[in-house]
Amino acid sequence: MADPFLIEFSKIGSSMLGYISVVQNSELPFEIKRVYWTYFTPDSVVRGHHAHHDLEQIIFATSGKIVFTLEGLDNTVHEFTLDEPNVGLYIPKLFWRTIKFSHNAVLLCLASAEYTEDDYIRSYESFQQLKINHLV
Ligand code: TYD
């Protein structure tokens, strides 16, 4: 099963002009089917608390700082801090995530499928059960 990892995209420009970063399907581990973004999350809030059966994502902090804690079916825990707009976090399917935001953070997500609530695992107990099934 794949692990999450950071992908560094090129920065076109300079500190004098500012920068452009570009994502193209041909460079990604999946085809983009959906894009969403979140913003104005208070820094006292922890979001996430779910995993996905099939969804793969690449997530950017286009501004501010976002800290992801990802737990895999094999019990490994990965922590990633996103604070550079040209660096994306690839999250494979079946990782339980919690997410903390700085007050000015904007999260941009490129997703491998359109939204369906059926793809969510929202109960930590259900995720723990999947871990047990994974071992069998
Ligand atoms: P959720 O994925 O649970 O957000 P977070 O993990 O950041 O707290 O989504 C929050 C709500 O938004 C939930 O009711 C589902 C809805 N939603 C959509 O309708 N479409 C989407 O593409 C996404 C990502 C969420």
Image (cartoon, helix red, strand yellow):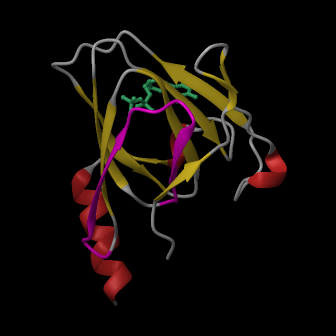
Q: Is residue 17 left or right of residue 85?
A: right
- The residue located at (46%, 33%) in the rendering is 84
Give 21 or 123, whichever is nearer the viewer: 21
Q: Position of residue 28 (x, y in %)?
A: 72, 53
Task: In the displayed orientation, state which residue is furthest to the left.
Answer: 44
Q: Position of residue 108 (x, y in %)?
A: 55, 28
Q: Position of residue 136 (x, y in %)?
A: 34, 90
In the image, which residues are magenta? 74-93
Q: Position of residue 35 (x, y in %)?
A: 66, 29
Give 122 or 31, whichever is nearer the viewer: 31
Let me know if residue 81 is in the magenta part: yes
Q: Is residue 113 left or right of residue 61?
A: right
**Image position of 83 with respect to 54: above or below:** above
Numbered label tally: 0
**Image position of 117 with respect to 7: above or below:** above
**Image position of 73 with respect to 60: above or below:** below
Q: Is residue 10 left or right of residue 135?
A: right
Q: Is residue 77 left or right of residue 62?
A: left
- The residue located at (53%, 41%) in the rendering is 87
- The residue located at (49%, 76%) in the rendering is 1
- The residue located at (20%, 22%) in the rendering is 45
Q: Residue 54 is drawn in which quadrant?
A: bottom right
Give 4 or 131, whichever is nearer the viewer: 4
Task: In the displayed orientation, state which residue is furthest to the bottom.
Answer: 136
Q: Residue 78 is drawn in which quadrant?
A: bottom left
